[in-house]
Amino acid sequence: MDEKRTVGKYFWLKLLMVPIGMFGFAFALIPLYDVLCDVTGLNGQLGNSQVDYSKVVNYAVDENRHVMIDFTAAISTGFPINFYPKTKKMDVIPGKMYTIEYMAENRSNKVVIGQAVPSIAPSLAALHFKKLECFCFSKQVFQPKQPVVMAVRFVVEPDLDKSIHNITLSYNFFKIDKSKT
Amino acid sequence: MATTTSDIQTEIDKHDDHAGHDDHHHGPEKGLMRWVKTTNHKDIGTLYLWFAFIMLLVGGAMAMVIRAELFQPGLQLVEPQFFNQMTTLHGLIMVFGAIMPAFVGLANWQIPLMVGAPDMALPRMNNWSFWILPFAGAMLLSTLFMQGGGPAFGWTFYAPLSTTFAPDSTDFFIFAIHMLGFSSIMGAINIIATILNMRAPGMRLMDMPLFVWTWLITAFLLIAAMPVLAGAVTMMLMDRNFGTSFFDAAGGGDPVLFQHIFWFFGHPEVYIMILPAFGVVSQIIPTFARKPLFGYSSMVYATASIALLSFVVWAHHMFLTGMPIAGQMYFMYATIMISVPTGVKVFNWVTTMWRGSMTFEVPMMWAIAFVMLFTIGGFSGLMLGIAPADIQYHDTYFVVAHFHYVLVTGALFSIIAAVFYWLPKWCGRMFNEKLATIHFWWAVISVNVLFFPQHFLGLAGMPRRIPDYALQFSDFNMISSIGGFAFGASFFLLTYIIVDTIRNGKPVKEARVWESAKGLEWTVATPAPLHTFDEAPTRELILAESSHTGSH
């Protein structure tokens, strides 16, 4: 009773493709993860795109609803900038537009180029926190010992889940290598 | 006609002037070089098992340091940094050095014997995949002696602990993981090729013993999951040395991404360590219950569905990373769904024993202990799978208790059961049954004293991986440590029993060492000669020796 063989002698070479493919898959997880976060706003990673003014003027404003926004600032290691929000906390009404300012001062004697990466917590709020203007949209050049005021104009959409009463907007500044810019 | 080793060997020898060193019908080479150059599946199986046993003792010694430090509250014996290295290396050594190589060793010994093949499909790669291991293990252990100490970030090596804040030796750790991964992948490819290519011509897939089935599925898990781990450590290496920011938020990366990649490997990994255990127990229980295995095909399908589900539940390790409710719900239900095929297996083992003519030889006692204690570990796993409850359990000793019940009383117990079950066949000598029985009760009682109180500690909120604890945890920690020392000491007895068996055990002549055992491995002479099944067994023999059909 000879069973018909369905695999050949060099079947193991084909098998080798599985680990090679899966090794690639581990790296493919990174764009997949970013796409998933962009689509769903998970991880607060939605914050780096500009919204049109025209889109945000027609919100129905409920004056009785309040959301507390916390602003935080952070810098990556070795980034010689004093960076902090002028306003630490703000009570906002969803649907209205607000502007706040962040301060930054280059402590070093060299020109420093940086890019801010925003993050919004909780993740569910990220979809509804719209920035109309932000210093995070572009690279920032800091002249030595020069204080800079940077504005953020934002609106919290009224569609924000009713259970959310607090939102944190944080920025992390990191250095951009001059040779690569 | 099936492809046999000798075919491949002939093929290789055509291109190789050094032909003949694996020539059949010659004895093995004398001395140490036999073990260095061997391509024989039995020799390599033996090497794997001894390597795993040594690593088990090394990892066990580290566990003793952990339990000694936790014997009393406060810091008594070791520095916290050293304690962290102990917890990290204990986990890594036990997972990658002890449990996985032990199962590969069992596969090497048993799979060719159980499918009627003369050897593994790729004997030289087999030699290579073993001999990578001692070097990888040595490299991992050598980090302990380096400046800054060894890895101290837990066996899960979450970024940025393992990237930004890790000691310099972490690069050695990364390379060791790469080598261990290579070894596992090669071993797995070899096992798949052996099972699919080298089976006796009369053996259909659904005639294969369950140990072979579970290993076939495990091997597929290995080749799919280990490369993802290799990817994760490669990204770590690049973050540490080449200025990338895969896991660094400041550079646009994300530390949570590390957890996703790690657990995409990590969850299948836990099934890599338990599916072969299911196979072992499914061989032992029918032998000593003197009944064919109940529900063989449901066992095969249950194993396959556990394997498939294992790839889609990884984020239940990450309930506290800020997942949306929908994600938590999905991962919770998917996780709990795994208990259905696992329940099928436990049901089938119990039903195999039901109304069987049971006898309680040492391997059977270990198998029964496995079924009972693994089930306890399964239940605590169910509790951990409940997302809202996990907020309390996460990173506590409850988790430690859970995975030690499934890995020690699960995977390790099944390995011990397998060694007692097949050792007489391997070396032609019977172990000292009286001592082995004493050892069984000693180990089973002490392991419960060791791990059961850890459930209570975890429920009360004692965090894992911390060298000190609040005073209210003192009593249970002391009980747990006493159990730990007793369990640790039981391995001296186990070492003695095994060495004594090999050296002076009572010779066994019968091919069928256990009178009620079924399977092709019991048709070859005892002790198993170096070369077996030069001629494939007939289909009649295969069916007569099936442990899951017909009568015992």
Image (cartoon, coloured by chain):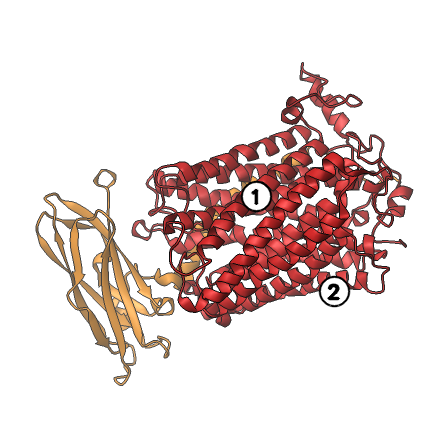
Chain colours: A orange, B red
Name the kind of residue labelled 1 in the image.
Leu
Q: Is residue B351 in view from this perspective?
A: yes
User: Dot 2 corresponds to which residue?
Assistant: B347
Indicate the quadrant containing the N terminus of chain B: top left, top right, bottom left or bottom right. Answer: top right
* Direction from residue A151 to residue A41 in the image, left or right: right
Q: Are marks 1 and 2 in contact (CB under 8 Å)?
A: no
Mark 1 or 2, nearer chain start:
1
- Residue B9 x %, y %: 72, 24
Residue where numbered disc 1 is placed = B57
The residue drawn where x is 78% and y is 56% is B297
Disc 1 secondary structure class: helix
Q: Is residue B322 above or below residue B240?
A: below
Observer-nearest residue: B43 or A123?
B43
Along the line of sight, the residue nearer the viewer: B384 or A153:
B384
In front: A173, or B119? B119
Provide residue B152's location: percent of width, then percent of height. Answer: 41, 48
Indicate the position of residue B25 as horizontal and vertical percent values: 80, 22
Q: Chain of mark 2?
A: B
Task: Name the image quarter holding residue B172.
Answer: top left
Residue A23 is left or right of residue A132, and the answer is: right
- Residue B214 place in picture, x, y as percent: 70, 50
Residue that sits furthest to the top in the current view: B17
Name the mark nearer the viewer: 1 or 2: 1
Q: Name the amino acid type tagged 2.
A: Phe
Q: Which chain is indicated by disc 1?
A: B
Give the tally of numbered discs: 2
Q: Is residue A110 above or below residue A118?
A: above
